[in-house]
Amino acid sequence: MRELIYTVVESFYERATKDILIGYHFDKFSSPEVLAAHLERITSFWEMQLTGSTSKPLEAPFHLLFTHLQLKIKRGELGRWIVLFHQTLDDLEANVEHPNIKVMNDLWKKRIALFEERFKAHPQMFGAS
């Protein structure tokens, strides 16, 4: 399952880093090594969210809201992130043969909706529009 999750994360970052609206948030991944380490960490995060555990040990706990607070994202950028993630999941479902792909995507979209609620419940998450 981790390999499939990694495929989604990698595909999403491929889109997001080039996106005209939110791509600049990913500029901090200045080298392939930094990005690769981040992708592994994000894969662990989503593996935990989708399966309840992770197959790789974590070096540090996840602090989703605190980590993103520093970015001072705009409300529209949150919406764009969600659109890109849904597109990534939909493309994967259409193009990858896997027995659990539909169930995983449905669960993933529910988790994304939960995170959207959590972000919106904390107005300090957002910078000036």
Image (spheres, rainbow, N blue to C red):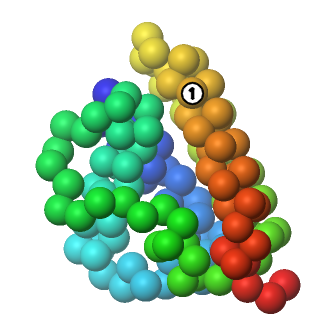
Q: Quadrant of residue 23?
A: bottom right
Tell me where residue 16 appears, x and y as whole percent. 59, 64
Query: Looking at the image, which residue is at 23% across and 64% down?
Result: 60
* Percent position of residue 110, x then y: 64, 33
Find numbered disc 1 in the image and state the secondary structure of the residue it sits on: helix
x 51%, y 24%: residue: 104
Q: Amino acid at mark 1?
A: Leu
Q: Is residue 76 above or below residue 96?
A: below
Q: Quick check: 1 left or right of 28?
A: left
* Residue nearer the viewer, 49 or 109: 49
* Crowding at mark 1 (Cα within 10 Å: few <14, some 14-19, many 20+): some
The residue sitting at 72% across, 51% down in the picture is 117
Q: Residue 78 at x, y = what percent?
A: 72, 64
> In the figure, 69 relative to 109: above or below?
below
- Check disc 1 and report the residue beneath it: 107
In the shown orientation, is residue 76 left or right of residue 53?
right
Which quarter of the image is occupied by the N terminus? top left
| Left or right of 75 in this view: 6 | left
